[in-house]
Image: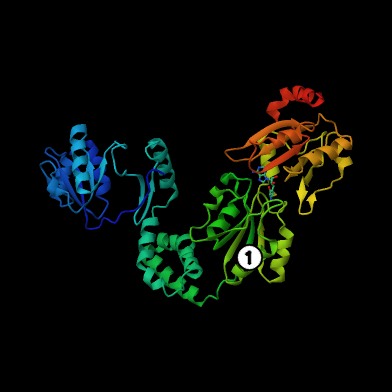
Amino acid sequence: MKHFPIFLAVEHRRILLEGGGDAALAKLRLLLKTEARIEVFADAPAPEIADWADTGKLMLRRRELRPCDLPGAALVYAAGEDPARDARIKRLAEAAGVLVNIVDNLADSAFITPAMVDRDPVTVAIGTEGAAPVLARAIKRDLEERLPATLGPLARIGKAFRSTAEALPFGRKRRDFWADYYFFEGPGALADDGPQGAEEVLHRLLARHLDAPARAGHVALVGAGPGDPELLTLKARKALDAADVVIHDRLVAPEILELARREATLIDAGKQGFGRHTPQEEIARQMIAHAGDGAQVVRLKSGDPVIYGRLDEEIEALEAAGVAWSIVPGITAASAAAASIGRSLTRRGRNSALRVLTGHDTEGFAEQDWAALARPGTVAAIYMAKRGARFLQGRLLMHGAAATTPVTIVANASRPDQRNIASTLATLAADLDDATLSGPAIILYGLSPRAAEARLPELQELAHAP
Ligand code: SAH
């Protein structure tokens, strides 16, 4: 982030602008929405600027900006549309320590003005650091359509009620009250009965929330999907939005943790196969303690929590402690991996059954029904296989699986650094040893990437090589 977005307090402060043409007009239309004192310096101002000056909306000085104008100003805009004039303003502003923006000149500006969606007091600022104004405009249009026009009045009425709402204890209770106002009862009341209706709703809701018993804690065991935030379910998004505490696994992508409510406490319960990890009892203890305090806890697991997520153990611990829980399923790594190679995990005439296995478990390498796996046409999704690959390969070959059986390794499925390696049973372990292969990897045994179909004979040839 080369530019940090902030909202600047400008009430009663001076904002200076030099220039009187189109660039000046465009900026002034935005600046006039603020409560700042606007001063325009222009020898030949556009008629609109003169009108605004006549109606007291801004102060017009028909001369150039001088050093003595700058002290105490919050911001300066150089909108002269003339490089020499703008450079002069930049020099003066810098000498006076005032932030300067040169219109349409990102490189020389100390700050930039974002694209804005205005539902005052709710404002959304959109910036692309100058990379793609088209994108900023598209996002703005999208938000304009999505945010109801009544959001402004609704928020203004809510803001005036803030101190009254402080009768509710800070935290969850107060948040629930505001959520009811903004998302459920407020919009309808404002539409039907105007501002007075919205105010009545606030009073009614406050009485109701003051009386309501404290909400009980709850643990949602949520699937975070394989990594791509767009593969989160809507339910997972909602749970993250409402979470007070998020206890997540190591594999959960940072982009997904970003989506948790900003005030939420994030707890890393990272587990590493065969290595350092937070013991299961400690995870259970944390979930129970936070839920006991009335928190909405999200236990966030990569992929689908119902697959290799030690879900039952956690649920049993919650039940023993009398904590309410729910499961939000997610997209498992195998689904994302299969999608990435353009294959389905089952197929008529090839495999009607799909095997889901783990390469190693807490006891070490996992034993399987090797004879069944070795049968032609078998498809298996093998999780946590990195360390167990050589063992797996040996067992399968020993039980008669063909060395040419197609195998695909998918690392970091659905993430920007995803890698797919088309391999065979014969070359699997060597391919997995590849030192450049980092991140979680899953093996799709019995499947080759659709795109590598043409290369299959060549791969199989390699499998026969000594
Ligand atoms: N509950 C998870 C699995 C957890 S076990 C799920 O449903 O996906 C951890 C294993 O999942 C890893 O060792 C790896 O085999 C697999 N895995 C998880 N995320 C992955 C990803 N993005 N790409 C490839 N494999 C992944």
Q: Residue furthest bottom?
A: 211
Percent across and percent down for residue 253 are 58, 48
Q: Secondary structure at mark 1?
A: helix
Circle 1 is placed at which residue position? 287
Left or right of 190 in this view: 445:
right
Q: Which of the two residues, 291 or 231, is positioned nearer the viewer here?
A: 291
Percent across and percent down for residue 330 are 65, 50
Residue plotted at (68% across, 72% down): 322
Residue plotted at (69% across, 65% down): 281
Q: Which coloring applies here?
A: rainbow
> Is 334 drawn above or below residue 185 in the view shown?
above
> Is 91 drawn above or below residue 322 in the view shown?
above
Q: How many marks?
A: 1
Q: Quadrant of residue 279?
A: bottom right
Q: Quadrant of residue 299?
A: bottom right
Tell me, yes or no, if residue 342 can be seen here. Answer: yes
Percent across and percent down for residue 13 are 22, 55
Q: Quadrant of residue 231?
A: top right
Percent across and percent down for residue 156 are 35, 61
Left or right of 437 in this view: 12:
left
Few, some or many C-alpha atoms within 10 Å of disc 1 (few <14, some 14-19, many ≥20)? many
- Residue type marked 1: Met
